[in-house]
Amino acid sequence: MESSRRYKRLGRRIRSPSRGEVRTAKTSAAVLASIRREGEAAGAAWRSEMPSGSLQQLKQLIQRQWASRWSQARGQLRRLDWRSIWSQSQAFGEGALQGAGFSGGRGFTPLPLQGSAAAVMYADPSSGAALPAVLGELIRLPLAETILVAGDVPEEFLLQARSHEHVTIASLAEEIDADVGRALGAKLTGADIVLFVDARKPVSAELLARFLWACDEGLDVALNDLADSRKMFQERSPLAWLREFLNATLGRSDLRLNMIGSLPFALSRNAIDTIGSADLAVPAKAQAAALLRGLKIGTAGRDGSGLAPASASPAADAESIRMLGDHFEAWQAAAAARGFRLRYEDRSRDRRAVGGVVCDEIHHHYPDE
């Protein structure tokens, strides 16, 4: 209780943003310096009240204060571009850490989120070398927890993961499909926003934060933008064709090849509950479910210039066949919901010329009158 009262007293010292701080899309150096000084003052005040307080306690306070600072000024906040939002958040976080006497490390950047956030990843024996860098970026973000689903990894890997704060490990005796692992991880957290990341590839905290921000601002599904407008359709990979065709047939050609499953991406709690764990384990079906059920879907950031080219190997061939099957399952689910022609009417053929033999529900969902 005493700790809670201290936090409330400290929280009142953080002022609301002035109009000058949101007057332009770009944040000036003077504004950043002012925000940093605010952070330093907040950190110093916290340290005087909590001389034995931990870094994690300070991070929680910083996040609450920064989110509260902008809670009454969402309209002003939306006038800023993403770079300015990140720069101001970073300045406040760095200042608070310095004011509290914490130096070194990668720092912490609070975000003006209205809800809670968590990260989910799947790791197998090939993920070990990259894990420290991946977790190093995640701890810079205001995540309530990080769920790590580990399939048949060595004990050293688990010890490495446990050394990071707020990492919950679900250790499995055998390797499983990575998409299935991440779907399992999503079931283990109740956060308002879930960020899905690759345990084998670190992505900057700033880019990952964009996905959290996009969902906090109203998207149910915040996708990684892999579209490459420089390539003609015939120059893209067969997997890209499948993805693009699935989006087009379900009425979202603007999404091009961007789909759930391309890491990193983020889902709102509404999206996770609506899609369901079973479909979330199959990205193509998850994409179809999200589109069929009217979820708000868009791109939030861009990591990489496109899909990795398929390699010529038996394993790659098997993976391609599996993905093809996943997309057919997605179309089957769509047909069950919208009819065999997905509500696209056939206006070019006159079936009455053959006696209407295909004017039935099974062969032709939209018979000619």
Image: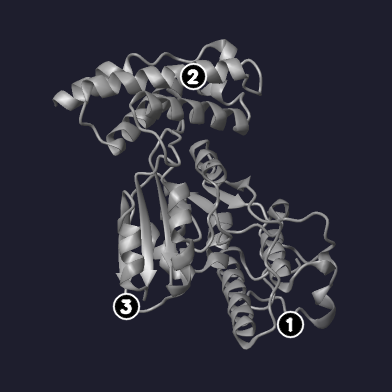
Label ID, residue 357: 1
Q: Which residue is drawn at 48% across and 38% down?
A: 216
Answer with mark 2 or mark 1, whichever residue precedes in sequence. Answer: 2
- Say whether residue 201 is left or right of residue 117: right
> Mark 1 touching mark 3, by CB under 8 A?
no
The disc labelled 1 sits on which kind of residue? Val
Q: Which of 231 and 97 is in front in this view?
A: 97
> Which residue has dot 3 on it?
173
- Point out the image quarter for the C terminus: bottom right
SS type, badge 3: loop
Camera-side mark, 2 or 3: 2
Whole-number angstrom distance, CA of label 1 to CA of label 3? 55 Å
Per the model, the C-alpha gap separating discs 2 and 1 is: 73 Å
Q: In this view, does 176 lie above or below 55?
A: below
Residue at numbered disc 2: 35
Question: What amino acid type is highlighted by mark number 2?
Answer: Ile
Give SS at disc 2. helix
